[in-house]
Amino acid sequence: MNAELEKLLKFNEDGLIPAIAQQHDTGEVLMMAWMNKDAIAETLETGKVCYWSRSRQSMWRKGETSGNQQKLIHFRLDCDGDTILLLVDQVGAACHTGRRDCFFYEPTKTGVDIISEPIMSPEEMYGKK
Amino acid sequence: MNAELEKLLKFNEDGLIPAIAQQHDTGEVLMMAWMNKDAIAETLETGKVCYWSRSRQSMWRKGETSGNQQKLIHFRLDCDGDTILLLVDQVGAACHTGRRDCFFYEPTKTGVDIISEPIMSPEEMYGKK
């Protein structure tokens, strides 16, 4: 990671920055996850998106178990240096539920609708390790 | 806010959820900010996006001082209930720098490029209170 980028990055108290993944050509917002300094450096170096898993407290190389990798097209940082936008090329489903993207709950006046269906089964995603 | 939505929302230790604002028709990711329960309720009720300002520790009715409001088109929640996607109609600039969106830093091998220019001056944004 170069010094100018490093100076701009503003990590939270846990050493993390939220990263939004957007499909580069269709504009779909796929998911949001977190990156630490090592995940950012690896992503920029390899061109494959790597997050930091807060639940597992380990590097999360997206698609490592599911095959649903994210190829990095553009890496962008916001005005405050505290949010990342990743323009990616997403293989298959971004969401662990097998949906293309994670944003499938939409509230109504009285409840919450589910607005998309899985494009892959759990077996397709996690059976092919 | 209805009970089903309330059950899905997963706030962090500060009572906040990150919210991504995306222009509903072009797909531009405009900005990311934070919402607390009151900001979510107000946004859903009024159809105008309201965030929680962490720096000012107060409700942040987007566009209140700049006029650059965000009209809510769709409110979506992700699979884990811990990230919101707001599809909005953004008036003018979303970014406090006068740029349409906040994601204008792009790292190169040796430095960081600025990839967009302001569409409004600070005077245009903050002089017309």
Image (cartoon, coloured by chain):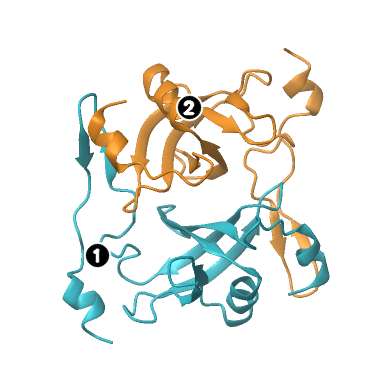
Chain colours: A orange, B cyan
Q: Residue at x 62, y 25 (%)?
A: A58
Of all residues, the one furthest to the top in this rendering is A129
Q: Residue at x 33, y 56 (%)?
A: B101
Image position of A85 (left or right of B125): right
Q: Which residue is mark 2?
A: A39
SS at mark 2 in the image:
helix
Of all residues, the one furthest to the front in this rendering is A13
Q: Residue at x 65, y 44 (%)?
A: A102
Q: Residue at x 63, y 38 (%)?
A: A100
Distance (Cα) linking label 2 and label 1: 30 Å
Residue A64 visible in the snapshot: yes
Find residue B38 and report its image quarter: bottom right
Q: What amino acid is labelled 1 in the image? A: Gly
Q: What amino acid is labelled 2 in the image? A: Ala
Image x and y of residue B61, in percent: 46, 77
Check the image and report above or below for A33 versus A50. below
